[in-house]
Image (spheres, rainbow, N blue to C red):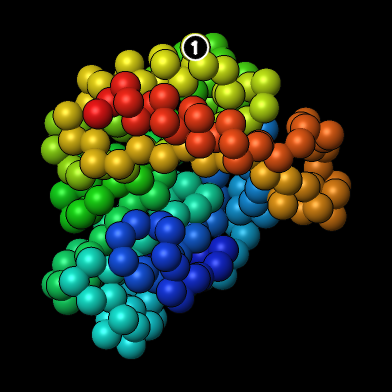
Amino acid sequence: MQQGRIHSIESMGLVDGPGIRTVLFLQGCHLRCRYCHNPDTWQLSGGKEIDVGQIMKMLKRYRPYYGNTGGVTCSGGEPLLQADFVTELFKACKAENISTCLDTAGYGNGSYDILLDYTDLVIFDIKHVISEKYHKLTGGDFSIAKTFLETVIAKNIPLWIRHVVVPDLTDGEAHIRQLGEMIQTIPNVEKVELLPYHTMGVGKYHALGIPYSLEGVPPMEQKKIQYLQNLLTEMIA
């Protein structure tokens, strides 16, 4: 039975997919997003080892709360780094009629085709739409995330898109319009959310002795987020 490394578990999450969901935050991430608020999830060697059987026992206990729309969400970190584990878990969930959701930046290091066959919903975090700026923001290669997105489109899996808006980095109108133009080309998008940058994770950097590159950048203003969200919604309506 597959074992996974889990950073933490939220038993009844309300924002990581439809309905009430159990959210598994998996350990490990290859990206180094400048605004990441969970640097303690970066190392794959961290967290606690748990096997699929243990998780299924927990999910069955919570199943009465899921109703017709809730279920399990695998988030991170980056769940694609533990694709074999998540695949076995999602297979077991489908056998028990528990809805599955993958919350990801699309940045794995192996095959995820079979995993997506057992995934009911993908929440895809688009970091940036321009390759060079994607790299500056995350340290990663945009083509890896783009290939994942293309696979989700080809399999026609329901898709929610999220994008973090950071002052002076991703809060420009021109940038949001570029994002909207990209989303217009994706046929299976059901929902698009702009998430405001916040500073709640800064203390973790200090505690871990990791330099924080956005030191002094204020949280995103809610008024501007709403303006940009309205702009984006009008574009893709």
Q: How many marks?
A: 1
Q: Where is residue 42 in the image (x, y as percent from the top left)?
A: 62, 48
**Taking 50 as reference, is 37 left or right?**
right
Q: Residue 210: image x %, image y %?
A: 81, 42
Classify 179 as above or below 203: above
Q: Quadrant of residue 125?
A: top left
Q: In which quarter of the image is the N terminus?
A: bottom left
Image quadrant in which you'd find residue 216: top right
Q: Hey, what amino acid is under mark 1?
A: Ala
Q: Can residue 51 be seen in this view?
A: no
**Tag 1's secondary structure?**
helix
Q: Nearer the viewer, residue 52 or 118?
A: 118
Nearest the eye: 229 or 149:
229
Name the residue at 29% across, 31% down: 149
Tell me where residue 52 appears, x and y as whole percent: 34, 73
Q: Which of 235 and 9 is in front in this view?
A: 235
- Residue at 77 percent of width and 53 percent of height: 204
Within-10-Å neighbours for mark 1: few <14, some 14–19, many 20+: few
Residue 219, image x, y percentages: 71, 40
The residue that mark 1 highlights is 174
Q: Residue, x 28% and y 26% (percent of image)?
A: 236
Residue at image location 51% in from the left, 65% down from the top: 6
